[in-house]
């Protein structure tokens, strides 16, 4: 793995995983079955043995939200401004339809 690949963020890696899954059905099925091993083999991402990794596939009848760990600063709660900077400071409106879910970012 090159130093450029090692420096990638979680968002970069997730984008590569999704792109490959959309292009390769066998990879997607393997990823759904054993995400930790597949991610390590295909992208060189190593997870701690005690870390649980799961992958869910959305469809037109299901939508999943991920609630990340809430950052703590030595036991202090974050201000509204700090929380907005962590989550990007935008609102998401979700519209379900026959072609799947649509997201409108405001």
Image (spheres, rainbow, N blue to C red):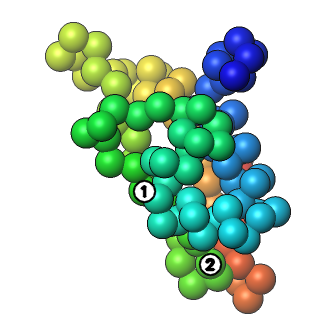
Where does the image place residue 104, in percent across and percent down from the top left? 72, 58
Q: Farthest residue to the bottom: give it.
A: 98
Q: Residue at x 69, y 34 (%)?
A: 12
Q: Classify mark 2: helix, strand or loop.
A: loop
Q: CA distance from mark 1 to mark 2?
A: 17 Å
Front-most of residues 21 and 69? 21
* 87 versus 54 height, above or below: above
Earlier in the chain: of badge 1 and badge 2, it is: 1
User: In this view of the protein, can residue 103 be seen by the observer?
Assistant: no
Where does the image place residue 23, in percent across and percent down from the top left? 81, 63
User: In this view of the protein, can residue 45 be seen by the observer?
Assistant: yes
Residue behind mark 2? 59
Where does the image place residue 70, in percent across and percent down from the top left? 33, 33
* 10 versus 35 height, above or below: above
Q: Classify mark 1: helix, strand or loop.
A: loop
Answer with the quarter of the image where residue 103 lies. bottom right
Residue 54 badge: 1
Where does the image place residue 42, in percent across and percent down from the top left? 65, 43
On the rendered structure, is 69 left or right of 24? left
Front-most of residues 41 and 53? 41
């Amino acid at each position: 793995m090159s130093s450029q690949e090692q420096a990638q963020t979680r968002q970069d890696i997730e984008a590569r995983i999704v792109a490959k899954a959309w292009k390769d059905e066998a990879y997607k099925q393997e990823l759904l079955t054993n995400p930790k091993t597949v991610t390590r083999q295909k992208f060189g991402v190593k997870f701690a043995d005690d870390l649980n990794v799961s992958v869910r596939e959305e469809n037109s009848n299901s939508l999943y939200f991920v609630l990340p760990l809430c950052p703590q600063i030595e036991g202090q709660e974050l201000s509204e401004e700090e929380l907005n900077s962590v989550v990007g400071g935008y609102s998401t409106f979700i519209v379900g339809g026959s072609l799947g879910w649509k997201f409108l970012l405001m």
